[in-house]
Image (cartoon, rainbow, N blue to C red):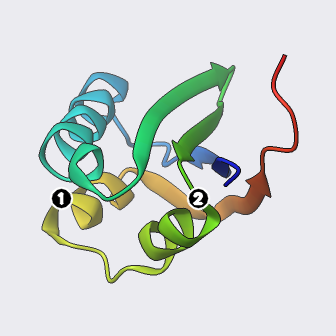
Amino acid sequence: MANAIFHCTFKLKKSADVAEFLQAAKTLHDEYISKLPGFISWQQLRDGDTWLDIATFDSMENMQAFATAEPNELALHFYSFLNMPSCVVRYYSVEVSH
């Protein structure tokens, strides 16, 4: 079964504090996402004011369960930093790794 990637680009709200955002992401990871079935990793990348989240799961099924789950309190706090209209989400299956 191929790994699956959750890929989301976004910008933070102008009022967002980056340190607080990163702490919210860490808490979300440590207390929720890292415990989900099939979770492998979550990377956060940044290029200027554009951010990229890449979460890897062991299957498309587990990734889609994560992506479509009702947001909990930790996720809602994380989302409160995001400029939601800027979010672009894509799902990928890993075809080959080198």
* Residue indicated by mark 2: 59
Q: Nearer the viewer, mark 2 or mark 1?
A: 2
Counting from the top left corner in percent of width and height, residue 36 is at 29, 57
Q: Is residue 82 depicted above or below 73 in this figure?
A: above
Q: Is residue 73 depicted above or below 83 in this figure?
A: below
Q: Is 78 placed left or right of 23 in the picture? A: right
At mark 2, the secondary structure is loop
| Spatial CA span between label 2 and label 1 | 24 Å
Q: Is 36 placed left or right of 50 in the picture? A: left
Counting from the top left corner in percent of width and height, residue 21 is at 31, 36
Q: Is 64 placed left or right of 70 in the picture? A: right
Q: Is 37 placed left or right of 90 in the picture? A: left
Q: Is residue 22 depicted above or below 68 in this figure?
A: above
Q: Quadrant of the C terminus?
A: top right
Q: Residue at x 41, y 53 (%)?
A: 38
At mark 1, the secondary structure is helix
Q: Amino acid at mark 1?
A: Leu
* Residue indicated by mark 1: 74
Q: Earlier in the sequence, mark 2 or mark 1?
A: 2
Q: Amino acid at mark 2?
A: Ser
Q: Residue at x 60, y 39 (%)?
A: 54
